[in-house]
Amino acid sequence: MAPAGYLKDYGRKEILDHFDPAADFGRIEAMLTSGLQIDTAMSGLSVVPGKDRSTVSMPNPQISAQTVWMLAVRDQRDRAAFAALFDHFAPRLKGFIMRSGTGSGQAEEIVQEVMLTVWRNAAQFDPARAQVSAWVYQIARNRHIDVIRKERRPLPEDLGYGPTEDADAGEIMAVEQEGDMLKQALDRLKPEQREIIERAYMGEFTHQEISAQTGLPLGTIKSRIRLGLERLRHELKDMR
Amino acid sequence: MTVITHHTPDALLAAYAAGSLPRPYALVVAAHISLCLECRAAYEAHQAAGGAVLENTAAAQVSDGLRAGVLDLLDVEVAPVTRYRRSGVFPGPVMEALKGQPPRWKSLGLGVRQCILSAGREGSARLLYIPPGQAVPDHSHNGLELTLVLQGSFSDETGQFSGGDLEVAGQELQHTPIADPGAPCICLAATDAPLRFNALIPRILQPLFRI
């Protein structure tokens, strides 16, 4: 059981904002009543200087519940947080995988692989570079393809440094905001446009088909690229 | 390190993130991202977009046993996957394709050498070693040809390509890459079909060399 602080510091409303109420409300209620909480003192969140390190600064209610859970998994190997991540992502992953024609049974096998990879590779999660959903998305695509092809797909070499343990809340929030903007941009699209984007990112289009699509990439991706590049340069500079 | 001026086109990066690129191309794109910060940033942006799609996907109910099954497996030790790191001019994904060994070059004549990394229905990926001033045999190709420069540089009708640059040659491009003076040019090249050579003799040799 994780130490106290999570629900108190982040506030019930902020957490609920990140949930699909129909699916998750029961679990939140259960968390509130059982006192199931997640450590907020992990190093990934900004700690107000000069104060007790267990005090997490308040002005970052926008850090999503998924990121808080993922950091608890990464830094504390917190099983309750992992279970919460499972409850959030597993049904979406299953729906995502099944949409490209995979049967329910095999989809669940892939979901299992993906979630176990999330647990095992948690040390690679860097909230200053990616939202949890982006990280899980790439794991899901990789595992799905590996399962179909029975071999590992070529992946880029990592940058040679792990996530910085003390990414500050501002950096995390910038990433979360960009992610939210992308999500909103997707929501604003006409259904048929949205369908095209969804199918592209589900791996149903060849690169020629993606080239032929107008409106892809979303304009929002351009600013995400620029900001992402600034961050990468910044991190590399810090490394030297 | 030279400045990379020829990048992976966005559609290829999106297709790579989504996993829809043929494997030989995926290897070249993975190798280029390993060398190029700009394309890494673009790749990560596509992951963010993919994440947004995932978040918006309608949930499908998972069976009762799955959650318990996954939680039970958290403590099971698994052998860590070997991640290959850059060695010399070869970035991690190339080292993985080489299984951690130095390339075993085969001569193509005139000092040109190649090392085939994969060849099959999806196309082929290979390393090329081209001495300065030497040309890659004049060729055209059925589909897209991706060429990533790992050492030295080459020039062809479309421009100069040096360390880290990626040339994307469409089917229509009839080009004659020639290695520039200086260090021998080492490239990673991928096609989605066997290369077609224009001269008669190379065409006969083609099945032999699998180029």
Image (cartoon, helix red, strand yellow):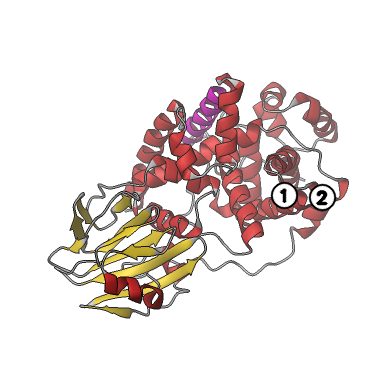
Q: Return the x and y of residue B19 as percentages of the image width and height.
A: 54, 49
- Which range is magenta? A170-186
Q: Is residue B88 left or right of residue A52?
A: left
Distance from disc 1 to disc 2, alpha carbons, whole Å, reads 9 Å
Residue A53 in sight in this render: no
Which of these two is toward me, B177 or A185? B177
| Labels 1 and 2 positioned on one and the same chain | no
Few, some or many C-alpha atoms within 10 Å of disc 1 (few <14, some 14-19, many ≥20)?
many
Question: Does residue A206 sit above or below B196 in this rendering?
Answer: above
Q: Nearer the viewer, residue A80 or B29?
A: B29
Q: Residue furthest right?
A: B64
> At numbered mark 2, what does the secondary structure look like: helix, strand or loop?
helix
Answer whether labels 1 and 2 touch (C-beta < 8 Å): yes
Q: Which residue is mark 2?
A: B66
- State the residue position of label 1: A111
Q: Is residue B92 left or right of residue B113?
A: right
